[in-house]
Image (spheres, grey):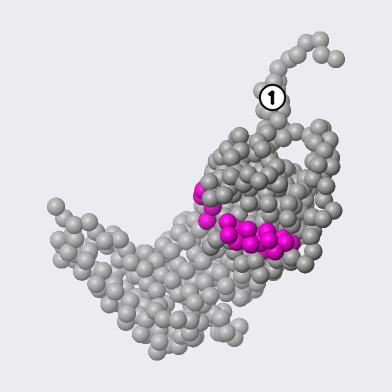
Amino acid sequence: MSAPIPPPISLTPPGEREVVEEAKAEEFTRLWKEQLEEQKKKVLAATGKTELDESVVLCDKISLTNKSYTAGAAVHIASFLTATDGTNPSIASKITVADLSDIIASRMEDEGLQVLQTICDAFAHSSLIEVDLSDNAMGSKGIKACRAVLSGQAGSLERLSLCNNGLSGTSMQEVADILTDGGEDDEIVCERLKKIHFFNNMSGDEGCNAFARILSRCTGRLTDVRFSGTRAGSEGSALIASILEGMGDEKVKNIERLDLADNSFGPEGANNLGTALGRCSNLKYLNLRDCLLEDDGTGIVCRAIWSSDSPIEHLDISGNEITRHGAKSVAELIEENETLKVLLLEENELTSLGVKTIAKALEGALDGAKDDVDSDDDSGSPETKSKAIIEELSLATNECGRIGGKAILKAYGSAGENMPCLKKIDLNGNMFPEDIVESLTSAFGDKLQSMDENDDEEDVDEDIDEDADEDEDEREDEGTMDLKGAVDVHELAKSIAGVKIDNLC
């Protein structure tokens, strides 16, 4: 029996970050030739042949990242990739993954553009599946220089990253033109995409308009979407939410990762966003940090996640002005969820009462379990155990004091028995008294992140009347539904749609 054929290798320049001139590029290509020759020997030994079949792929990935290439170096590397004298077909023609991120740092504009075009043109006859062009300063000229790995890959490209490129709204429109244009073969890049990442481009509302165009042409193949750090206003953010909603069940149901951080959805945009999230039945990762959701928007998002029954593992809703009232929606989601591993809620306005509500949910105490945090019994033995399997929790910077701290300690249990999966907890930036900090440090040990920004100068909970506040919460809750109740009504409405009911006035 012949040995299994070894998997294709990846080509990566060795060494630390540096400027790569032509002489250094020659060193890289000599090393790569040696690696390819060694790979060829392994393949021939495995197949028992003396010559390689043209179908054999020696190398399918190249990573040029974290180097700054001169124009001469780029020409040398491109020549190596496209040459057919040593390998037929060329190395470039077999490569499917090209990491071209961060390759022109410190280059003057003209040389940087030349490097981008030279390297990208080397893949003009490739069938690239994944391209990463992140961390290259690109305006309109840069987008044009990279056309060979964008529009030139319409029949194959599935994963695209353009993060931290300094793309303006105008540049984003040019990217959208490329990705949505059918070209001569009527093949549209968007229709094949599974992953699309735009991050930290500060493209504003015009960038939202461009990304909306891109999303509208995507299909049910989409699984990983990132459009964050855009400095979008409410109008642009609302457009993104509306497009996601308008994509329908089939186009969003396979999304597993969704990062829309730093978009200004607000409670109004959350309505459309919630409809879309309710259809994302395979969602595992959701980042809505700094999206101005407030309590109402948070409730909508939590209900949507619950109703979708998605296997959510990572939820970040930090920096959304969530108060103790919004904490109830988060708590209800936690108690009903059996998959959530990472919950990030830092930089909100939960106060101790909101933190206590979430702590009780982690403990499984929302539905009648004992919740007297002043009790001498800190064993954390609630009547109803939570389904939560939280591994990472952040409640940092939430105006939390003694009451919240004691609730967290009780939720954890004397030996962590109530949160056995916890690996990391961040409570920094709050206002715990010194004795509570000592108790937290003792209880969580190395799991507790630095508390260097905790303010223990004043008792932030001094004016909190827990009984009065809880009575007020109960009165407010009388006219509201929990997650389950809200969804039941929705399902009931769908079930009777179209049914004729006689004598109904």
Give the residue displayed 30% in from the left and 77% down from the top.
Answer: 33
Determine if the magenta segment contains residue 109: no
Residue type marked 1: Leu
Tag 1 secondary structure:
helix
Q: Is residue 349 above or below residue 250?
A: below
The span shown in magenta is: 420-443
Q: Is residue 209 left or right of residue 418?
A: right
Nearest the eye: 363 or 218: 363
Q: Is residue 363 left or right of residue 6?
A: right
Q: Position of residue 145 (x, y in %)?
A: 56, 73
Q: Residues within 10 Å of mark 1 (few under 14, many from 20)?
A: few
Determine if the magenta segment contains residue 423: yes
Q: Is residue 488 above or below residue 349?
A: above
Q: Is residue 354 above or below residue 163?
A: above
Give the residue displayed 18% in from the left and 59% down from the top.
Answer: 47
Question: From the image, which quarter does the C terminus lie in?
Answer: top right
Can residue 119 be seen in the rendering of this structure? yes
Residue furthest out toward the top: 503
Q: Position of residue 203 (x, y in %)?
A: 70, 66
Total number of numbered discs in the rendering: 1
Give the residue displayed 24% in from the left and 68% down from the top.
Answer: 40
Q: Is residue 302 left or right of residue 135?
A: right
Q: Is residue 217 left or right of residue 273?
A: left
Can residue 430 be seen in the rendering of this structure? no
Give the residue displayed 85% in from the left and 53% down from the top.
Answer: 463
Q: Position of residue 290 (x, y in %)?
A: 71, 58
Nearest the eye: 316 or 11: 316
Q: Position of residue 324 (x, y in %)?
A: 76, 48
Question: To which residue does mark 1 refer?
Answer: 492
